[in-house]
Amino acid sequence: MQATLDYPTLLEDLELVDGLVKHEPTSMELLCRRYSTVLKAIIMKVLHDESEAEDVLQEVFLQVWDRALTYSPEKGKLLSWLSTVARRRAIDRVRQTCAYRRATDRFEVVSRHPCKEISETHPVEHAAQQNDVRKLIDRQLDLLPDNQRQALCLAYLEGRSQREIASITRTPLGTVKTRIELGLKKLSHAIGGSRDKIL
């Protein structure tokens, strides 16, 4: 905690960035010790969710590890750059979550096709339409990348939570969420373009 209160000098930060550019593990450890508390606080102001904030914080550190070379001391302090990265990542997560919910809603509406009048007055036609929808979904699932198809099947066919999927597939939770989101978007787009032909 003390390390986050006594902010380092510019020289110390430059040495730290130099180590990150060289991919020195000790530099990443120092970065986490030095800035994790303040960065998580920034992320929490946007997300208001502990587990989501932890997930995004890890994404921030991975981005810094991969792109440390893009930091320029002429444009500001290291903490300012890190704060910007953290805030943008948090906002991106909010957008992803909203897009994921919208895609999920569309997918469920189309796959369930809750048209009561058709199902009651024309049960044979309704069953045929439902069968067509299922076939379309199966075809579109087959077109998805394996990891996205696996995540969707575990979530919707087996009813697994995202954390369970992460554990089963040994994949980071953030990656699981992204795979489900991308898969749902593709399915929603494909099904949406074919609804008039099916329903």
Image: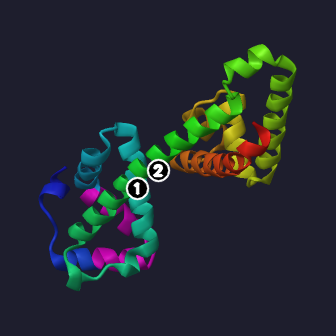
The reply, left or right, for residue 59 in relation to residue 161 is: left
Q: Is residue 30 magenta?
A: yes
Write down the quadrant of residue 107 in the picture: top right
Residue 116 lies, with reference to residue 51, above or below; the image says above
Q: Secondary structure at mark 2?
A: helix
User: Quick one: quadrant of the C terminus?
Assistant: top right
Residue drawn where x is 30% and y is 74% of the image = 16
| Residue 104 coordinates in the image, percent (x, y) | 57, 38
The reply, left or right, for residue 48 in relation to residue 59 is: left
| Residue 174 coordinates in the image, percent (x, y) | 51, 48
Q: Are marks 2 and 1 in contact (CB under 8 Å)?
A: yes
Amino acid found under the numbered disc labelled 2: Gln
Amino acid found under the numbered disc labelled 1: Asp
Label 2 – label 1 distance at C-alpha: 6 Å
Tag 1: Cα neighbours inside 10 Å, few (<14), some, or many (≥20)?
few
Residue drawn where x is 40% and y is 42% of the image = 52
Tag 2: Cα neighbours inside 10 Å, few (<14), some, or many (≥20)?
some
| Residue 26 coordinates in the image, percent (x, y) | 39, 66
Q: Which residue is mark 2?
A: 96
Q: Which residue is mark 1?
A: 92
**Span colored in magenta:** 15-35
Residue 18 lies, with reference to residue 122, above or below; the image says below
